[in-house]
Image: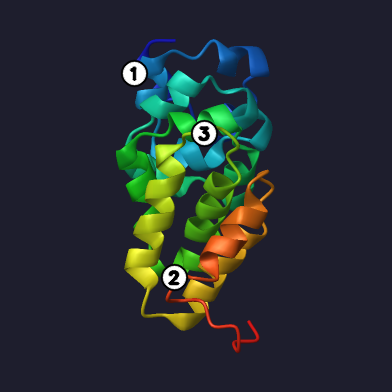
Amino acid sequence: FTPQQFAAIEVADLASLSDEQIIAMTTGQAAALTSAQVAGLTTSQIEVMQTQDLAAIPAAQIPHLTTAQMKALTTPQLQALTTAQVRALETADLAALTTDQFVALAALVNVTADPCPQREQALADFYAQWQHEALVVDKWLLVQSTSRRADTLATMQALTAHPAFDLANPN
């Protein structure tokens, strides 16, 4: 398929593409995906998508990933997200905060590679955006303290010194 032909594939037909066809997708084809096509990718297709192809998807299409698709992203795929893509996830519709934005943050928090500037930037941006919303900040603290990373205990200890941490808060 040319990028134009790939962009013309109906959303319903996109799900019928095999893993091999998704793996063979070119960067140009990935960049031509529409928001409906991005949302129509199956979790299996997301899992096998090449990291460079995921990074080629326009930032404006990234917020259309579903919660299940975000959970299917691998560590290398998350690390391949561009700054614009991460910002697009973070600034997605506020009504979708507890689903899309938070799932994206939770996925990035669990990236095990060090250094991972996308993870650190997403945490800083999320806090900057929501620092005046106590319940959202509680989620920000929670997602870091429940990370699967090996340094989670040290992270938790550091968070106890953060101005947003309140030992008396039951959340």
> Of the residues tagged 3 and 1, which is closer to the observer?
3
| Residue designated by label 2 | 95
Q: Label 3 near label 2: C-beta < 8 Å?
A: no
| Residue 148 vs residue 66, the one in the foreground | 148
In the rendered image, is residue 15 in sight? no
Circle 2 crowding by C-alpha within 10 Å: few under 14, some 14–19, many from 20:
few
The spot of residue 97 in percent (x, y) is 47, 66
Look at the numbered disc 2 and give the secondary structure of its residue. Answer: helix
Q: Amino acid type of disc 1?
A: Gln
Q: Which residue is mark 1?
A: 4
Left or right of residue 40: residue 124? left
Q: Is residue 126 visible?
A: yes
**Within 10 angstroms of label 1, few (less than 14), some, or many (20 or more) residues?**
few
Q: Give the percent coordinates (x, y) of residue 148.
A: 69, 47
Residue name at image x 41 percent, y 27 percent: 55
Q: Looking at the image, tell me whether mark 3 or mark 1 is earlier in sequence order.
A: 1
Is 131 above or below relative to 116? Answer: below
Q: Could you give the CA–CA distance between mark 2 and mark 3, rounded to whole angstroms?
A: 32 Å
Residue at the image point whose x is 52% and y is 60% from the top: 102
Is residue 92 positioned above or below 60 on the image?
A: below
